[in-house]
Amino acid sequence: MIAKGLWSRDMMGWAMAAALLPPAAVVVVDQGVEAVLRMGSVLAVATLWQLLFRRLRGVPWSPSGAVLAVAMAVLAPNGLSPVQLALGASFGIVLADLIFGGWGRNVVGAAPAALAMVFLTGPGTEGPGSETTMLLASGTSAALLLALGILPLPVLVGSVAGIFGVMALIGAPWDSALLAGGAGFGLVMLLADPVCAPTTRVARLAYGLLGGGLIALLTGAEGLAGAERATVFAVLLAQVFAPTIDYAALATKRLARERRHA
């Protein structure tokens, strides 16, 4: 769902692009030229696809390319070749976004789809570092988006509750959350995408619980440090089930209303 009124599609896009600046700065400081090249190449590929679909099918510009570029720099494994990055970015932006008419009509985000592809086909090396700094940068992004009313708060609350709830059940160390930079970025910029999240408050809370719980479950008892791979697949699974969760919440609300008036 995209907000109406002041927050048009374009304004929300610019706000989300601005929220990407703190995580992007952390990646550039940590990785240097490699991060710039990685983000630049992904953004260039995504922009080319967006221009092509805009020319052929009239699909408008969206922030998907910027989110995809920063997400690939933050969460993708190290050691990927430019060809692997380009293929992953193309898979995500085309099949998860543009083919549905662009950002605002997609079911899953371009970034988690592209990252899932590179994790399945690329090398299994560790992702970028600076976990604690990335967590703080993601918190800054969340604060900005919350202040602007773009980030769905129930998703964020539910995801945090889901993470710590499952960590308590499986005995994972809670202090590993201080190193969960990749998970923090994924929660704010991917799981809480206002387009892919459900529309009702209850459904958003359940969706957040599912996404956060899956992250903790997939990382296991070792904790959240280095949870990039788990975050990507948890977000993708949660987004796939988001419409079902929304439908169930709406059906339950409708049934309760009918019983009250019976």
Image (cartoon, rainbow, N blue to C red):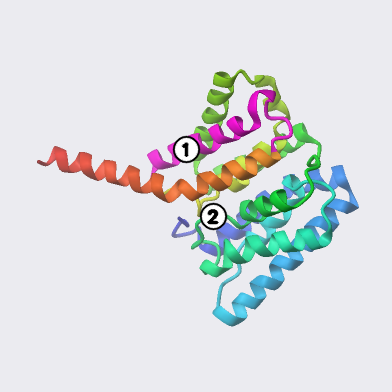
Where's residue 15, x and y in %? 61, 54
| Left or right: 122, with 2 as reference point | right
Number of disc labels: 2
Name the N-terminal-most of marks 2 and 1: 2
Residue drawn 34% across the image and 44% down it:
248
The residue sitting at the right extreme is 33
Residue drawn 42% across the image and 51% down it:
243
Q: Quadrant of residue 11?
A: bottom right
Residue drawn 61% across the image and 34% down it:
218
Magenta segment, which residues? Answer: 200-227
In the image, 215 versus 140, the foreground residue is 215
Decide: is 217 above or below 171: below
Please name the residue that numbered disc 1 is placed on.
Answer: 154
Q: Is residue 96 visible?
A: yes
Mark 2 or mark 1, which is nearer to you?
Answer: 2
Please name the residue that numbered disc 2 is placed on.
Answer: 108
Magenta span: chief secondary structure: helix
Where's residue 17, x and y in %? 66, 55
Determine crowd level at label 1: few under 14, some 14-19, many 20+ residues with C-alpha closer than 10 A.
many
Decide: is 55 above or below 47: below
Q: Quadrant of residue 36?
A: bottom right
Give yes or no for residue 172 being in the magenta stretch. no
Residue drawn 45% across the image and 47% down it:
242
| Left or right: 260, with 221 as reference point | left
| Left or right: 220, with 27 as reference point | left
Q: Amino acid at mark 1?
A: Pro
In the image, 165 versus 95, the foreground residue is 95
Instruction: Using the numbered discs, state the Cα–Cα distance from disc 2 to disc 1 in whole angstroms.
Output: 19 Å
Determine crowd level at label 2: few under 14, some 14-19, many 20+ residues with C-alpha closer than 10 A.
many
